[in-house]
Amino acid sequence: MIQPNEEKLHAMGAEVLAIEKERPHVPLERATMAIRFNPYMIGTQFHPEADAEGMHKYLRQPACRLRVVNDHGAEKYENMLELLQQPDKILLTHDTLLPNFLEAALQYQHT
């Protein structure tokens, strides 16, 4: 979602929690990545539960590889595989974001 209607979100008690990272080389507006709709429901456009091993296995499937290469090129495909091995990428998200998210959700519920 781009250009969320802040007035409607506020009226329903929702708030934007995250937007897409800034990428100056991409000429598109940054997308909304997470919204808290109420104390018990959050919607996201990313998968914090994804793990490097599972993503690597998925990306290595012939149909997935073909789709990525056709849509984005072989260099991008290889870069995606390399990023899975970097500790500050998906590993950090998986090992940090999800546990912290769950902890914050539990604390939020008790306030």
Image (cartoon, rainbow, N blue to C red):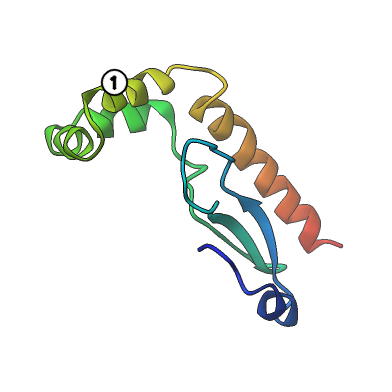
What residue lies at 26% left-to-right and 35% top-to-bottom? 72
The quarter of the picture where the C terminus appears is bottom right
Residue 58 appears left or right of 90: left
Callout 1: SS: helix
Residue type of the residue flagged with mark 1: Glu
Residue 75: % across, % down: 27, 22
Quadrant of residue 9 within the rendered picture: bottom right
Residue 66: % across, % down: 14, 35
Residue 71 appears left or right of 35: left
Residue 56: % across, % down: 31, 27
Quadrant of residue 60 within the rendered picture: top left
What residue lies at 53% left-to-right and 55% top-to-bottom? 31
Crowding near the residue tagged with mark 1, few <14, some 14–19, many ≥20 C-alpha atoms within 10 Å: some
Picture layout, residue 27 above or below residue 92:
below
What residue lies at 70% left-to-right and 71% top-to-bottom? 14
Q: Residue furthest right?
A: 111
Residue 26: % across, % down: 46, 41
| Residue closer to the observer: 77 or 50 | 77
Picture layout, residue 52 above or below residue 98:
above
How many circles with numbers are drawn on the protein? 1
Picture layout, residue 82 above or below residue 110:
above
Quadrant of residue 50 within the rendered picture: top left
What residue would you read off at disc 1?
A: 78
| Residue closer to the observer: 73 or 107 | 73
What residue lies at 21% left-to-right and 24% top-to-bottom? 74
